[in-house]
Image (cartoon, grey):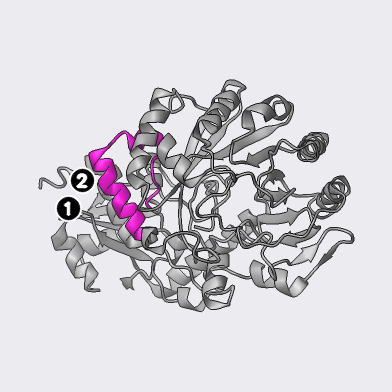
């Protein structure tokens, strides 16, 4: 009997108690320090009730039995992924009417467009042939897909018609500037959701996400959100955060509450970290590491709890655990590229995912003018998981982390099968303090 | 030890977005 290789043991932020979680056994417990500290030193308790409880919950294991459970869980993960829904991104243009301070596509040098309608038709023909037996939906991406030019609108009309003809949902990732004008057209589609970005209240948002001519965009984007919600479409509001606008996230929360958005069941949110994907897009000193962002968010929430009405940060699996009373399935792979995500652009190229769509040298094939895939490139992306990545082999966090992002790993190391580590233990420490307060006090008479 | 697991083990696989943020997969930016 020994301690599981998948135990995650971390002292809860601001508390004497510890969290012990195991994604393989699906167990999570709060421990008093006198129980946790020997475990943190790698010491098992002597035979008795304490050891029996650890064994019953998969925290203490026979190695061969745990290896068997690990293999079974991995096979189940692969089986589930084989039938999982695929997200197909389509980029009708890399052009954009915004000049965001942190644009990750600003160094792209896109080729001029060919016959946009013919390329879009070729996309649907490729989808019909190569993803016929898979559940799927399409996401319109960019650049900015909702521009006012006639050619841009005509392509969106063609996209709506193409998805409707196939019974497919359509999602749209837009800066939101022309969203209100597009709502009547989008209402005719099976809209899964519209993703729009606001980086704070007007003054802050407008300093970061302005038109190419320099004018602010907040008011018009907010009108677009209102119009979409009133039309019954789901809106996923994204805020891209760094040190310069974190405090403003609380002001954005107040705006969203006052606008009635947070009470609308069609309204949801996500946060994006401003970070170096391909190159440094903004002042480096303003960028957060993952941990720093969530540490500062934690402090912000203590001061401005209305933030939680707008968005509840995940803190690894902490939010999931405390909202659902269970842990998610083990995450053997967090990278969807070439598995459950593909990206297609108007030049006829196929890319692994949205992080690298349009980036020179990253295409894995073409769907126009003829279909061809680089099988070795696709295989390299598809093989990426925590069993393939050497550094994940000895990591106790791997079934919560999933190896991180393949595109980031490749940018940093030149290899797809490299780790992009997540600070899982520290995030769980903060997330347990944030979401587990009722469990933390008092515990076992303490 | 105080268990935080309130549900019986599920018989069917729980649906969890693969992407790291573990949020809706419709959104872009799951690479972080």
Secondary structure category for the residue under label 1: loop
Measuring from the top left, give residue B20's x and y in whole percent: 49, 56
Who comes first in sequence, dot 1 or dot 2? 1
Q: Secondary structure at mark 2?
A: helix
Residue A329 circle label: none
Q: Would you say the magenta stretch is mainly helix, strand or loop?
A: helix
Are discs 1 and 2 both within one chain? yes
Q: Is residue A338 left or right of residue A384?
A: right
Point out the image quarter for the N terminus of chain A.
Answer: bottom left
One can see residue A131 in this view: yes
Q: Which residue is mark 2?
A: A440
Q: Quadrant of residue A51?
A: bottom left
- Would residue A440 be found to the left or right of residue A117 on screen? left
Q: Nearer the viewer, mark 1 or mark 2?
A: 1
| Numbered circle sitting on residue A15 | 1
Q: Residue at x 16, y 46 (%)?
A: A443
The residue closer to the viewer here, A248 or A366, is A248
Q: Which residues are magenta?
A: A291-315
Asked if labels 2 and 1 touch by Cβ distance under 8 angstroms, the answer is yes
Residue A225, percent from left and from top: 55, 29
Residue count near mark 1 (Cα–Cα under 10 Å), binned few <14, some 14–19, many ≥20: some
Residue at 69%, 52% (x, y): give it: A94
The chain identifier of the residue carrying mark 1 reads A
State left or right for residue B27 relative to residue A152. Answer: left
The answer to whether residue A211 is above or below residue A282 is above
> CA gap, disc 1 to disc 2?
8 Å
Q: Residue at x 28, y 36 (%)?
A: A305
Protein chain holding label 2: A
Residue A26: x %, y % from top left: 41, 54
* Observer-nearest of A22 and A148: A148
- Image location (x, y in percent) of residue A186: 70, 30
């Amino acid at each position: 009997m020994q301690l599981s290789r998948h135990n995650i043991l971390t002292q809860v932020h601001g508390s004497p108690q510890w969290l012990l979680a195991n994604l393989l056994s699906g167990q999570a417990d709060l421990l008093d320090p006198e129980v946790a500290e020997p475990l943190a030193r790698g010491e098992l308790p002597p035979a008795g009730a304490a050891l029996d409880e650890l064994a019953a919950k998969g925290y203490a294991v026979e190695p061969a039995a745990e290896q068997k459970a690990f293999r079974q869980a991995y096979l189940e993960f692969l089986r589930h992924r084989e039938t999982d829904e695929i997200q197909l991104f389509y980029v009708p243009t890399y052009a954009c009417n915004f000049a965001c301070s942190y644009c990750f596509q600003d160094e792209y040098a896109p080729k001029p467009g060919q016959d946009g309608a013919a390329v879009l038709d070729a996309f649907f023909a490729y989808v019909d042939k190569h993803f016929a037996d898979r559940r799927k939906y399409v996401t319109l991406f960019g650049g900015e897909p909702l521009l006012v030019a006639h050619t841009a609108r005509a392509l969106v009309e063609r996209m709506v018609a193409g998805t409707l003809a196939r019974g497919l949902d359509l999602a749209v990732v837009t800066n939101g500037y022309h969203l209100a004008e597009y709502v009547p057209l989008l209402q005719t589609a099976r809209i899964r959701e519209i993703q729009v970005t606001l980086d704070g209240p007007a003054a802050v948002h407008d300093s970061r996400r302005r038109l190419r001519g320099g004018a602010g965009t907040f008011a018009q984007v907010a009108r677009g959100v209102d119009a979409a919600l009133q039309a019954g479409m789901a809106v996923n509001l994204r805020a891209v955060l760094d040190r310069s606008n974190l405090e403003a996230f609380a002001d954005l929360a107040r705006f969203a509450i006052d606008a009635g958005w947070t009470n609308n069941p069609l309204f949801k949110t996500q946060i994006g970290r401003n970070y170096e994907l391909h190159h440094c897009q903004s002042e480096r000193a303003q960028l957060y590491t993952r941990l720093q962002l969530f540490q500062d968010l934690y402090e912000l929430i203590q001061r401005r709890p209305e933030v939680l009405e707008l968005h509840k940060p995940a803190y690894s699996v902490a939010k999931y655990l405390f909202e659902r009373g269970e842990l998610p399935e083990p995450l053997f792979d967090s990278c969807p590229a070439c598995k459950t995500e593909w990206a297609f652009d108007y030049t006829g190229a196929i890319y692994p995912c949205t992080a690298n769509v349009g980036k020179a040298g990253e295409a894995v094939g073409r769907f126009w003018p003829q279909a061809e895939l680089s099988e070795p490139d696709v295989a390299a992306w598809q093989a990426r998981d925590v069993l393939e990545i050497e550094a994940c082999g000895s990591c106790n966090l791997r079934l919560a982390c999933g190896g991180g992002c393949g595109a980031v790993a490749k940018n940093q190391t030149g290899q797809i099968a490299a780790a992009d580590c997540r600070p899982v233990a520290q995030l769980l420490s903060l997330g347990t303090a944030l979401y587990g307060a009722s469990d933390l006090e008092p515990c076992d008479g303490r | 030890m105080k268990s935080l697991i309130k549900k019986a083990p599920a018989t069917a696989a729980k649906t969890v977005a693969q992407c790291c943020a573990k949020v809706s997969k419709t959104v872009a930016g799951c690479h972080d």
